[in-house]
Image (spheres, helix red, strand yellow):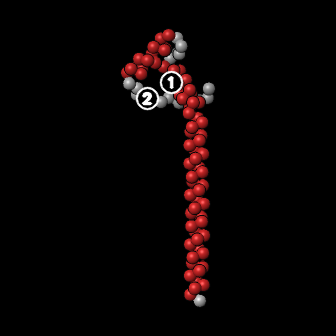
């Protein structure tokens, strides 16, 4: 494991009791180990969904950029047509 960072969290008492039950059985050496493992499990399970959501947002941003570029091109074409019509 890499460098660790201390954080403070607040949990409902019943969640702490649940964690302490697992620690008490010896399955986890302490509360931090339980929480670290829970976070890793959640991260592994949700990673595909998060990756998909990020890709969808990137695709949307790219599409919006293309639309903006097309709008700019259309505006320029309209200005060029107006200039030609004035001659």
Tag 2's secondary structure? Answer: loop
Left or right of 85? Residue 13 is left
The answer to whether any part of residue 74 appears in the image is yes
Give the answer, above or below, for where 84 lies relative to 66.
below
The reply to whether discs 2 and 1 touch (Cβ–Cβ < 8 Å) is yes
Residue nearest the observer in this picture, 7 or 35: 35
Give the answer, above or below, for where 40 lies relative to 78.
above
Examine the image and state in which quarter residue 74 appears.
bottom right
Mark 2, mark 1: which one is toward the viewer?
1
Q: Which mark, residue 35?
A: 1
Give the answer, above or below, for where 40 lies relative to 29.
below
The answer to whether any part of residue 4 appears in the image is no
Q: Which residue is mark 2?
A: 9
Say whether disc 2 or disc 1 marks the residue closer to the N-terminus.
Answer: 2
Check the image and name the residue furthest to the bottom: 87
Taking the spot 58% from the left edge, 83% from the top edge, the residue there is 83
Q: Give percent across and percent down for residue 80.
A: 60, 79
């Amino acid at each position: 494991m890499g460098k660790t960072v201390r954080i403070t969290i607040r949990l409902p008492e019943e969640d702490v009791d649940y964690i302490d039950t697992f620690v008490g059985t010896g399955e986890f050496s302490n509360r931090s180990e339980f929480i670290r493992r829970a976070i890793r499990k959640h991260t592994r399970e949700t990673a595909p969904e998060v990756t998909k959501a990020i890709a969808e947002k990137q695709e949307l941003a790219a599409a919006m950029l293309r639309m903006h570029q097309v709008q700019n091109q259309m505006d320029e074409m309209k200005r060029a047509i107006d200039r030609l019509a004035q001659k």
